[in-house]
Image: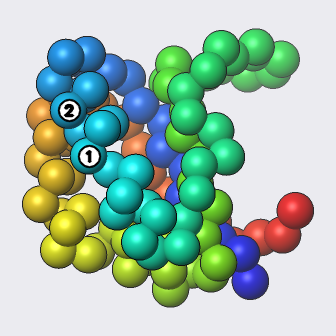
Amino acid sequence: MTAYLIAQLTITDPEGFDVYRQAVPPIIEAHGGRYLVRGGALSNLEGELGRPRIIVLEFPDKAAAEGFYNSPEYQEILPLRLNTATGSVVIVEGTV
């Protein structure tokens, strides 16, 4: 079953975050993932927005999404994101 990694972020250090943003795509691709949403303008229809930046990644399954997140390559660059943005990251299984 397809799995989606969804991040809702507030960027606190745009220059530092750009280093992370450039480093992460090959790691995502190596685990069979791809971007569906990468930032972009938000139109709030209901409720309160949690964070101003939303990223949605699609993976073949939950194991691939977890493999990406837990991989040594991602764990090496994760501090770049943690030091330049705040927010939440979840994995959800589903179909489109």
Question: Which residue is denoted by mark 2 in the rendering?
Answer: 19
**Which residue is located at x 26 percent, y 75 percent?**
71
Position of the N terminus by quadrant: bottom right
Near-viewer residue (71 or 22): 22
Say if mark 2 contacts mark 1, CB within 8 Å: yes
Above or below, comparing residue 81 to residue 34 in the picture? above
User: Gap between marks 2 and 1, in whole Å?
Assistant: 6 Å
Question: Which residue is denoted by mark 1 in the rendering?
Answer: 23
The percent coordinates of residue 18 (x first, y second) are: 26, 26
- The residue type indicated by label 1 comes to Ala
The percent coordinates of residue 30 (x first, y second) are: 41, 71
- The residue type indicated by label 2 comes to Val
Q: Is residue 26 toward the left or the right of residue 35 in the image?
A: left
The secondary element bearing badge 2 is classed as helix
The secondary element bearing badge 1 is classed as helix
Corner quadrant of residue 58 = bottom right
The answer to whether residue 19 shows anywhere in this view is: yes
